[in-house]
Image (cartoon, rainbow, N blue to C red):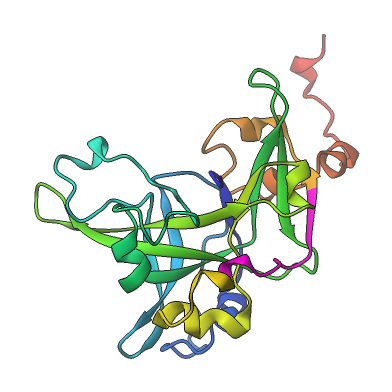
Amino acid sequence: MCGRCSQAYTWREIYAFSQPLTEPVSPARNLQARYNIGPTTTIDIIVKAPAGREIWKVRWGLIPPWHKGTIKQAVPHINARIEGVDTNGLFKRAYVKNRCIIPASGFYEWTGDEKNKTPHFISAKDGAILAFAGIWERWRDENGEEIISASIITRDANDWMSKIHTRMPAMLHPNDFEAWLDGSAGKEVLMRPPPELQEWIVDRRMNKTGVGDDDPATAAPVEAQASQPQEAPAQGDLF
């Protein structure tokens, strides 16, 4: 599965990645880099709108349009398995009608037992933005407010990723962006080899959702953090 990710990029980087967007590169937006995005919080997605590609901010955790109850009662379907995304009643409508690309600077997975988990950050080896395949839906809450939500499609891990986890996000190549978004591509594009990836271990504070969402050190290797010079403690802290 993919339960934590990072979206830390500049407007020019995401504009170049998302081409062609309906918006010009200037004036640029001020984007808040996020390093520890958890389920039910906001993520960026790229969709094909009538006028062209657009970037939307949506809830991570797909809510089907027929959900009855409050948003707190909705199960956050953050991932949709490729094996059933076109047949499962939760996802098949979105798979046909509402596809998206979820840009990511990287994502996190854990190794080790439940009481001693080690967090790993996985990203593109060349530093490029990754393109997770996704689906989205519209739902209205009890007050009539529209909530747009999305899910990341996952697949079996490839040989490289299987050393860390059994699943991984399905990743798209730029040449497949348009066919994925307009619905003409099948699941075969989701099974193409992903970009070359890299990984490193990060601080265990990542074991808690929401920690360091705006802190780049969240995604830094623990070795790099340990090598940073430490400030001397204040005089009153000496003991």
The location of residue 214, given as percent across then percent down, is 57, 49
Q: Is residue 231 above or below residue 8?
A: above
Give percent across and percent down for residue 28: 51, 81
Please say if 116 is above or below 208: above
The residue at the point 55 percent across, 76 percent down is: 11
Q: Is residue 208 above or below residue 44?
A: above
In-front residue for pair 114/129: 114
Residue located 29% across and 61% down the image = 137
Q: Is residue 138 left or right of 124 when viewed as pictured?
A: left
Coordinates of residue 196 in the picture (x, y in percent) = 78, 65
Figure disc tally: 0
Q: Position of residue 239 (x, y in %)?
A: 82, 8
Report whether residue 35 is seen: no
Q: Which segment is the magenta one?
A: 190-199
Q: Is residue 214 visible?
A: yes
Outermost residue, top side: 239
Residue 83 among those drawn in magenta:
no
Q: Residue at x 86, y 44 (%)?
A: 224
Q: Quadrant of the N terminus?
A: top right
| Point 57% across, 75% down: residue | 14
Outermost residue toward the left?
Answer: 143
Front-most of residues 69 and 191: 191
Residue 195 lies within the magenta run: yes
- Would you identify the image quadrant in which residue 125 lies? bottom right
Which residue is nearer to you in this view: 58 or 110? 110
